[in-house]
Image: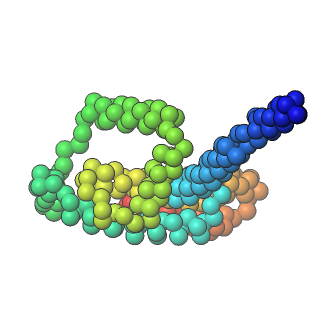
Amino acid sequence: MKLKMKGKDIMKKKTRVPCNFCEFSSSRYGFEQSLQDQDNEETVLRKEVVRLRSLIRRMTGRDDDASFTELQALTSHLENVKRIVEDHMDKIMPPDQVESKQKKNKAEDVGTSIPVPSTSSSEQREDKELLKMEREFERRKSESLQSEFERLRIYNERMNGRGIESMSCYHDVVQLDSQITYALMSLSEQMTRPLEEQLCKAEQGKNVVKIYGKPITDENKELRRSVRLAKKEKVSH
């Protein structure tokens, strides 16, 4: 009987000892599920970043697949946003900037010539911009996916005219205004490019027309007129 009891005790002890998988199965499954959730979140976040990049690229005139109608709509949209930004910029403009702007407007009204910056100052400004671009590139290269998403999300919101009233830093508003201006210039250039290509082809064909002695049609003149108008609009921006 004692031997049997010992055998039962041994069996009981054996049944109490779980295998590694049974002992850690719940925690192991939870860990794997957590990793899977993290992968899913990262995948969704990455897709959203790609989507925002595409939207911003199109909005800033860097998407060659945009149609002429889309470019016109984007230009009109950004012009409206630019007005909102300029209104807000006037509201939060520092006193010294207000005085400087008033002097500039007065000089323009009376026709006083405004001093043109020297070549050296222009070169310094270009060097400063280049250094800024290099630093921005380095920052983005080391930027996390979450940080990039937040930056692109905020930028996209502001380029759509949202959240501008909450911007309190004058420098940030001026920078946004400059970004919109450059975007409008890129969109304008993208719209005029096909016209210039057509004009170039027409000018090349004109030489052939001259060889055969046929009269030149008014189509080339119309193309030149379209290009001139488009360039004039680009300069006005």
Say left or right for 3 vs 182.
right
Residue 123 is situated, as x and y percent measured from the top left of the image, at 33, 32
**Is 128 above or below relative to 220?**
above
Scheme of image coloration: rainbow
**Is 140 above or below relative to 216?**
above
Residue 193 visible in the snapshot: no
Residue 12 visible in the snapshot: yes
Say left or right for 200 vs 25.
left
Which quadrant: the C terminus? bottom left
> Residue at position x 48%, y 65% from top?
75
**Residue nearest the observer in this picture, 219 or 80:** 80
- The image quarter containing residue 222 is bottom right
**Residue nearest the observer in this picture, 181 or 34:** 34
> Residue at position x 44%, y 61% from top?
157
- The image quarter containing residue 213 is bottom right
Residue 161 is situated, as x and y percent measured from the top left of the image, at 40, 66
The outermost residue toward the front is 1
> Residue at position x 51%, y 46% from top?
146
Residue 128 is situated, as x and y percent measured from the top left of the image, at 34, 33
Residue 160 is situated, as x and y percent measured from the top left of the image, at 45, 65
Across the whole image, how many numbered discs are drawn on residues?
0
**Residue nearest the observer in this picture, 214 or 12:** 12
> Residue at position x 72%, y 57% from top?
209
**Is 18 above or below relative to 60?**
above
Which quadrant: the N terminus? top right
